[in-house]
Amino acid sequence: MKKGEKGPQVVALQTALENLNYLQPASKKADGSFDGICGPELINTTFQYAMERNFNLANDPQWTTEIPDVYVAQAQTLQPVYGRGIDIAHYQPVVDWKRLQEGGVNYAFIKATDFSGKGNGFVDSMFYTHWDNATKAGCKKGAYMFWHPAFDPAAQADYFIKQTKRVYRPGDLRPVIDVERNDKLSKAEVNKRLQVVIDRLKASFGVPPIIYTSKRVCDEQRIEVGGECPVWLAFYVPAYDTDPGPKKDMQTTFRVGPPLPSQWKRFDIWQSGYGPRLPGCETTECDRDLMNDPKVTLPLITLS
């Protein structure tokens, strides 16, 4: 099966596997799709099994009774199971947190602060509303800052801390530094400034912050620090993938995850795509995130 292909036979097989409870409930996204969570591994391997034996779409029982349980069980063991989340800002003004959680979304990252072109800090217009509503609904959440290398790193960190520390509680997700640019600074300067932000957030929140970035960004912008922090990597499969290097097929990609910048040995969170509207967030599209920890326990803060 080609990467991203989803012909009628694949759809029939996915439906059969779901009806037989072969697809783990934790693998299903809120929009009903299994792609990008656990499904591709199982769907691809069982599809290959069926094609090798010339199963016919018209002969439905073959799809449901002639794939041995032991084969499906073996395929299931290859599936990574991720915690599913979203990241949002004022672009997603209407969020029904209860419906999101009922659909399997169990955490969110919410944009908190940014800096204008004049170097003045501002809070995202929906930050406190989203944070309060997520808290009331019992949804795990964390705040992120968009980092501008050209502006004073201490001022950006301190502004983020001032705006978010008062609403953070023990057990919330770690704060995030959104790293996407170098503002044409030298390699040494951009890494020095990012380290300042990391150190100030770590001192304030008690743990290293999460770094949001991608291998492409780190390579192009020459970002080398942050290895002590959990990493949240953007890597869209298949349609929006712009990272360099050979393309992986879906089966391999969803098993091993996104490509890693050199300062990390594993990923903690994977922004896997910008998907259709979700139940609970129908007014606009939003990013989909996969945590390499289905119980969403790794990136918690230790505020006292």
Image: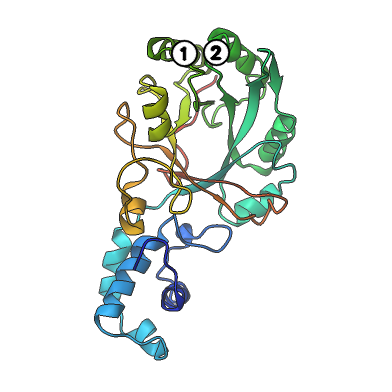
Would residue 141 be found to the left or right of residue 22 on screen?
A: right
Which residue does the numbered mark 2 point to in the structure image? 150
Reply above or below: 208 against 21: above
Which amino acid does the dot numbered 2 rest on?
Ala
Give the residue at x 66% y 57%: 279
Circles 1 and 2: CB distance less than 8 Å?
yes
Residue 181 percent coordinates (x, y): 50, 24
Question: Of callouts 1 and 2, which one flags the residue occurring earlier in the amino acid sequence?
Answer: 2
Which amino acid does the dot numbered 1 rest on?
Leu
Instruction: Classify residue 224 by image quadrant.
Output: top left
Give the residue at x 33% y 73%: 47
Q: Secondary structure at mark 1?
A: loop
Q: Quadrant of the C terminus?
A: top right
Give the residue at x 67% y 39%: 134
Residue 184 percent coordinates (x, y): 48, 17
Q: Which mark is residue 185?
A: 1
Q: Residue furthest front?
A: 184
Residue 233 percent coordinates (x, y): 43, 37
Reply above or below: 104 against 113: below
* Residue 68 visible somewhere in the drawing: no
